[in-house]
Amino acid sequence: QEWSLHSFDIGRPLGKGKFGRVYMVRTKTTPKYILALKTLYKSELVANKVEKQTRREIEIQQNLRHPHILRLYGFFHDEKRIFLMLEFAGKGELYKQLSKVGSFSEKRSARYIDQMADALIYLHGKHVIHRDIKPENLLLGINGELKIGDFGWSVHAPGLRRMTLCGTLDYLPPEMVEGKEHNEKVDYWALGVLTYEFMIGAPPFEDRGSVNNTYRRIARVDLKFPSTISAEAKDLISKLLQYDPRQRLPLTDVLRHPWIVKYRPKGNNAREGGSV
Ligand SMILES: COc1cccc(-c2nc(Nc3cc(C)[nH]n3)cc3ccccc23)c1
């Protein structure tokens, strides 16, 4: 199947991505499929020196099949742009909902982290580390299920970050802010930061006034919890936000953690194959 812009009826623009716009589109084939078409301007990719990273993002995401990872069905290009044919997530960007309500309940946060852990186990099983887990890269499907949407920073483990850090430091683990070699355990740390931000509405080491102070707080694991957070939630976050990557709670143990199990939708706890 040779895809081009002529293969689609272009719907409404959904919003602006980093290097171009995202449109809701429908295939002209029957049956008709609704997709999100992400446009990337080649000139922008070259200007930002991210063409290799983009090629890697496409190659990685095309081979991934998981309910909580946004599908990349294919891509095509014209002289100016690259077009990514992405799964359409009906409820849009998770961070917009987070900023609208301020923070999520422990139940909603635990269910998202359950889904994230499941997706990360799949990713790491394919020796892919995401390296850029944060609310801005997460989308919500039509049934409110979480979808990891952006693989711009993912690499095959172990990686050494060559790009200067753009955007927030808040999610980076000590080994990355110290420029050391890192492995898939950077995603364990980011999962801890994400859990904290879902429930509190801001990341744990944020210092809006000074990037250097965020650095320091990360390197010192300067972690404080508001009294409103349950002991079980604090326990999980503290086991993920460990300075030493080897001490961080393995993802399979995240799935078994009491705080996660407590909020897992009924029927999802049935033992493998156990039917009642
Ligand atoms: C950067 O892409 C942006 C930016 C702003 C909003 C949206 C957005 N996206 C989606 N779904 C998507 C997006 C992708 C790549 N797959 N599925 C749904 C929405 C619904 C309401 C408002 C906005 C929405 C995307």
Image (spheres, rainbow, N blue to C red):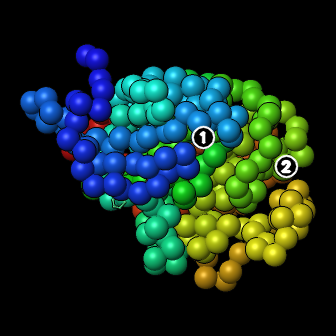
Q: Is residue 43 left or right of residue 269?
A: right
Circles 1 and 2, Cβ within 8 Å, touching? The answer is no
Label placed on residue 177: 2
Nearest to the observer: residue 31 or residue 248: 31
- Tell me residue 68's x, y (percent): 41, 43
**Outermost residue toward the front in this view:** 79
**Outermost residue toward the bottom in this view:** 227
Residue behind label 1 places its C-beta within 8 angstroms of ligand 1: no
- Tell me residue 67's x, y (percent): 36, 39
Asked if one can make out residue 24 in the rendered structure from this viewpoint, the answer is yes
Label placed on residue 44: 1
Q: What amino acid type is highlighted by mark number 1?
A: Glu
* Figure label count: 2
Task: Write down the quadrant of residue 90 in the picture.
Answer: bottom left
Tell me the mark number nearer the camera, choosing from 1 and 2. 1
Q: What element carries label 2?
A: helix
Q: What amino acid type is highlighted by mark number 2?
A: Val
Mark 2 or mark 1, which is nearer the start of the sequence? 1
